[in-house]
């Protein structure tokens, strides 16, 4: 079983002091001082060591279940509260897969699915959900169409029935479609008001060009206006099929009931559907830096660099390297250099972006114009240093300890657990991933991390974008 | 006739169900006080070996001296710098090395610090938090840097938002000389003019066990919690000089209307806020206001949404909320995004009509549906120990006794039709401020 490694600082060894003076009095004095320090000083390792609570890992006994109808799902029983959380997705049905001329359709469908199904119109449907505390949610990501259902165990049959209706017989009433379109057009307009949103659109356009990732994921006004009931129905038919379905279920429900629950919802979906093909994106990381001008209180930076897929053997080493570079909290290199030591920004980040068709490292910060150039210089310098010199063993231990010791936090909510079960299947991590995950982290060596850093933190392959603040548009 | 009977029967069934459910407490928590006045709330949840640890100080932007806007928030930042025992920068590192997620936030009425960690690291989190309750240390250099960071935060989080200027103006219009009128961050000028002495004064005045609540939510019971709270927080001395902030009493029932145009926005927004009693000021009214808000504008089945978005098409979105947690007054808010080509005058007229209509049409059946909507999903709040800690902490900070938090459902159920009518007429007679933010045509 995975155990945590805890980095221990050596306590100062005073034996040579004693030997040098050879005097009992000095020894006693030293002893007293040491006692005083350990009494008054702050020794985190000791506090953890002496804590009345010891390490224990959440037992994530995830099972793979197969329903009578042949649907596969990951399942975890948790009886803490009488509630159930179901997460699911339809693979490759997200916004990037919207057909040309229908950009925005996945979002519009997500918006409209809770507006009635079967014999229930929107008002009635939502009233039942509220009165029975059944929480249903849908969202179109770049790659996938994602859904969630949470219910009190005693209402599970009703919840299953309602979700089945939504996926097979959504109403898509004309007035609901018109209202949802208006909402989306409003969001599109509001997007124009925010410098951060405009900047991200600019970066994506420049990075991906004609590739679907270069689109505005909210959609295009002209296309949204042209969407109708028939197109929405087609979307559902083409995308909500068993061959794209991934399911995770957690909560106070037995294995048999979970199988029945899943069948009740998904069994009458068609086996297959159709969808458009999205090619891998080709990103030119060596392109020259580019800037846009916009009215804003600060300048902004976004930068991208090559990275690896989740299944690549470099994934964990690079993940840990980035944890040191820009990971959790304020003690990462970038945070220290730009924020903590200089006060140049409120925050700076860099993360491994794992979209299907383009993996990359992606980072950014914002800073008032008089600070911006200095902050940028520091980021570039730190980037180069990372590639050239890698990380020190203390930094490596710190990042590793964070990743190991924070393991249990992912089990805080059952919604998070069920989403994790879906992600495990989406990324082919296996049902025992949660039992092995800490071992994966522990297997990474400092050398692995430094090799990955040298391979991916290359200044020539860091592509940079600026938003330059101007006073009026 | 038969349909009507069926509906009533259904409602009775709902109520029957609720009465039997209301035996269950919201969190099944425990609370006790240490000798030094620190109040401790324990919310056991044994799903996973993790604990949310939060310390809430009754000290926020309202407690700042005039002209020292932003000092509560700047102090919140400096609390991460170090103490007499933990040197500058080490705090973050210790927390990270131990796998905890931590943060803090400052509001008008309070400041809270929180760590979410593995159970095995809980004691360490308690030791760190207890240490900085009494032994904060930072030098002038750290102060200057953090002041710059806070200045950048204001630029990034507030001023990069094109509606920020409007929101801050609305706040001033509504609250006038009341301290709720100021921005929590302070103005940029205030932030840059603060000194380290300002921060120390604030720290020494408000950061003390007898001015704080500790919340432990997660894999722990109250016996262990008591032992640990005593061990780590028990020795911190109480402070008796923390004089409570006094709030002006607002007596004029004025209302202001603002219309602002700017090229920075492309959709029209509306906000109307009413100054109403908080929980602390009037418990009965506050439950009625919460019910009223749910009925009027929370979710797509609410009255205003159906009327103004679905039927009349004058808004694209509308919602209401009631904040009862204030140490002084509470706020009741209606916000909307106008449909294109709807004028402010037309919207206001339709809104006022809809509000009157809503009150006229509210009957016993609707009221019980609204209450059930508020209560049906309460069990979900027990799921995530972090959410539970936020809710229990915020409610306890607004002076809500333990039994009122636990019996939230009973208190909501006890709201009568007449109470909601009274709450609605209260809105009409309270201080209010409304504003439209409109795009300016070039």
Image (spheres, coloured by chain):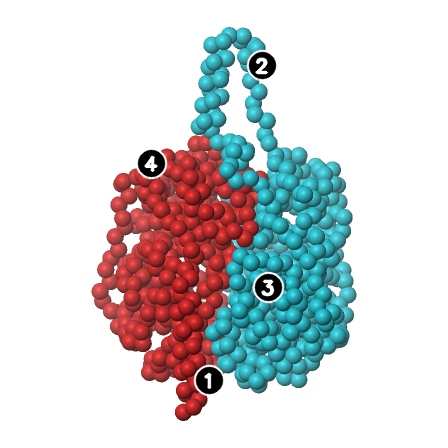
Chain colours: A cyan, B red
Q: Nearer the viewer, residue A121 or A77?
A: A77
- Mark identifier at residue A16: 2
Q: Nearer the viewer, residue B260 or B272?
A: B272
Q: Secondary structure at mark 4?
A: loop
- The quarter holding residue B430 reads bottom left
Disc 3 versus disc 4: distance between alpha carbons? 49 Å
Is the residue A258 above or below the residue B5 in the image? above
Other residues around mark 1 within 10 Å, as few (<14) / some (14–19) / many (≥20): few
- The quarter holding residue A281 reads bottom right
The answer to whether residue B90 is left or right of residue A141 is: left
Q: Secondary structure at mark 2?
A: helix
Residue B440 % position (x, y): 46, 72
Return the residue at label 3. A253
Disc 4 versus disc 1: distance between alpha carbons? 61 Å
**Are both tags, 1 and 2, on one chain?**
no
Disc on the earlier residue, 3 or 2: 2
């Amino acid at each position: 079983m995975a155990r945590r490694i805890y980095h221990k600082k050596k306590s100062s060894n005073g034996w040579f002091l004693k030997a040098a003076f050879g005097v009992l009095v000095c020894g006693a004095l030293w002893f007293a001082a040491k006692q005083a320090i350990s009494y008054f000083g702050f020794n985190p390792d000791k506090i953890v060591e002496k804590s009345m609570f010891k390490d224990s890992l959440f037992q994530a006994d995830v099972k793979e279940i197969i329903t009578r109808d042949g649907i596969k799902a990951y399942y975890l029983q948790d009886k803490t509260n009488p509630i159930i959380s179901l997460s699911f997705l339809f693979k490759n049905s997200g916004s990037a897969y919207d057909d040309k001329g229908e950009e925005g359709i996945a979002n519009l469908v997500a918006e409209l699915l809770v507006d009635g199904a079967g014999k229930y119109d929107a008002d009635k449907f939502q009233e039942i959900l509220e009165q029975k505390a059944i929480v249903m949610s849908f969202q179109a990501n770049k790659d996938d169409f994602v859904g969630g259902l949470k219910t009190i165990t005693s209402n599970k049959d009703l919840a299953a029935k309602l979700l089945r209706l939504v996926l097979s017989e959504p109403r898509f009433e004309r007035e609901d479609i018109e209202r949802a379109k208006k909402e989306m057009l409003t969001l599109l307009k509001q997007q124009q008001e925010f410098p951060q949103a405009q900047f991200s659109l600019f970066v994506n356009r420049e990075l991906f060009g004609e590739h679907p990732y270069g689109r505005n994921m909210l959609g295009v006004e002209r296309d949204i206006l042209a969407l109708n009931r028939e197109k929405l129905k087609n979307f559902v038919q083409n995308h909500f099929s068993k061959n794209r379905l991934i399911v995770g279920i957690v909560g106070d429900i037995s294995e048999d009931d979970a199988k029945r629950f899943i069948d009740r919802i998904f069994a009458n979906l068609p086996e297959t559907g159709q969808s458009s093909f999205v090619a891998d994106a080709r990103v030119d990381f060596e392109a020259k830096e580019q800037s846009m001008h916009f009215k804003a209180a600060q300048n902004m930076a976004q930068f991208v660099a090559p990275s690896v897929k989740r299944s690549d053997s470099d994934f964990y080493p690079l993940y840990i390297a980035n944890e040191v570079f820009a990971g959790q909290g304020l003690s990462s290199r970038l945070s220290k250099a730009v924020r903590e030591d200089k006060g140049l920004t409120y925050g700076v980040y860099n993360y491994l972006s794992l979209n299907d068709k383009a993996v990359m490292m992606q980072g950014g910060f914002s800073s008032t114009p008089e600070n911006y150039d200095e902050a940028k210089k520091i980021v570039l310098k730190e980037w180069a240093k990372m590639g050239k010199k890698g990380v020190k063993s203390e930094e490596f231990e710190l990042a590793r300890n964070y990743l190991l010791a924070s393991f249990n936090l992912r089990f805080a909510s059952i919604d998070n657990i069920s989403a994790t079960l879906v992600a495990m299947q989406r990324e082919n991590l296996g049902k025992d991933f949660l039992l092995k995950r800490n071992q994966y982290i522990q297997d990474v060596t400092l050398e692995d991390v430094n090799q990955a850093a040298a391979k991916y933190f290359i200044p020539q392959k860091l592509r940079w974008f600026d938003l330059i603040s101007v006073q009026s548009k | 006739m038969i349909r009507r009977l069926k509906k009533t029967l259904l409602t009775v069934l709902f109520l029957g169900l609720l009465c039997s459910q209301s035996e269950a407490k919201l969190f099944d928590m425990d609370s006790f006080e240490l000798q030094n006045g620190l109040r401790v709330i324990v919310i056991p949840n044994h799903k996973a070996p993790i604990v949310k640890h939060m310390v809430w100080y009754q000290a926020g932007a309202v407690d700042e001296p005039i002209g020292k806007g932003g000092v509560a928030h700047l102090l919140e930042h400096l609390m991460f710098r170090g103490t007499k025992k933990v040197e500058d920068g080490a705090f973050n590192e210790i927390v990270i090395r131990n796998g905890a997620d931590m943060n803090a936030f400052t509001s008008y009425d309070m400041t809270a610090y929180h760590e979410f960690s593995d159970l095995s690291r809980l004691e360490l989190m308690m030791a760190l938090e207890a240490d900085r309750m009494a032994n904060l240390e930072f030098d002038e250099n750290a102060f200057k840097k953090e002041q710059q960071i806070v200045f950048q935060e204001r630029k990034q989080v507030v001023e990069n938002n094109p509606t920020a200027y409007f929101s801050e103006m609305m706040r001033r219009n509504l609250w006038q000389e009341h301290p709720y009128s100021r921005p929590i961050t302070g103005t940029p000028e205030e932030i840059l003019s603060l000194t380290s002495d300002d921060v120390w004064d604030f720290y020494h005045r408000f950061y003390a066990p007898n001015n704080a609540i500790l919340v432990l939510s997660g894999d722990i019971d109250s016996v262990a919690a008591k032992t640990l709270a005593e061990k780590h927080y028990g020795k911190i001395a109480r402070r008796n000089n923390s004089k409570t902030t006094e709030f002006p009493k607002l007596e004029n029932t004025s209302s202001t209307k603002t219309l602002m145009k700017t090229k920075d926005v492309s959709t029209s927004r509306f906000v109307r806020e009413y100054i109403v009693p908080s929980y602390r000021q009037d418990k009965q009214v506050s439950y009625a206001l919460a019910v009223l808000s749910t009925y009027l504008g929370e979710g797509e089945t609410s009255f205003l949404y159906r009327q103004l978005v679905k039927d009349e098409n004058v808004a694209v979105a509308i919602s209401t909320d009631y904040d009862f947690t204030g140490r002084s007054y509470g706020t009741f808010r209606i916000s909307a995004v106008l449909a294109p080509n709807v004028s402010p005058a037309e919207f206001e007229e339709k809104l006022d009509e809809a509000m009157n209509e809503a009150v006229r049409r509210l009957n016993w059946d609707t009221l019980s549906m609204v209450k059930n909507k508020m209560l049906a999903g309460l069990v979900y709040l027990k799921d995530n120990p972090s959410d539970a800690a936020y809710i229990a902490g915020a409610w306890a900070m607004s002076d809500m006794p333990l039994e009122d938090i636990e019996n939230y459902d009973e208190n909501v159920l006890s709201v009568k039709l007449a109470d909601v009518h009274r709450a609605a007429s209260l809105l009409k007679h309270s201080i209010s401020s409304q504003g439209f933010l409109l795009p300016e045509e070039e």
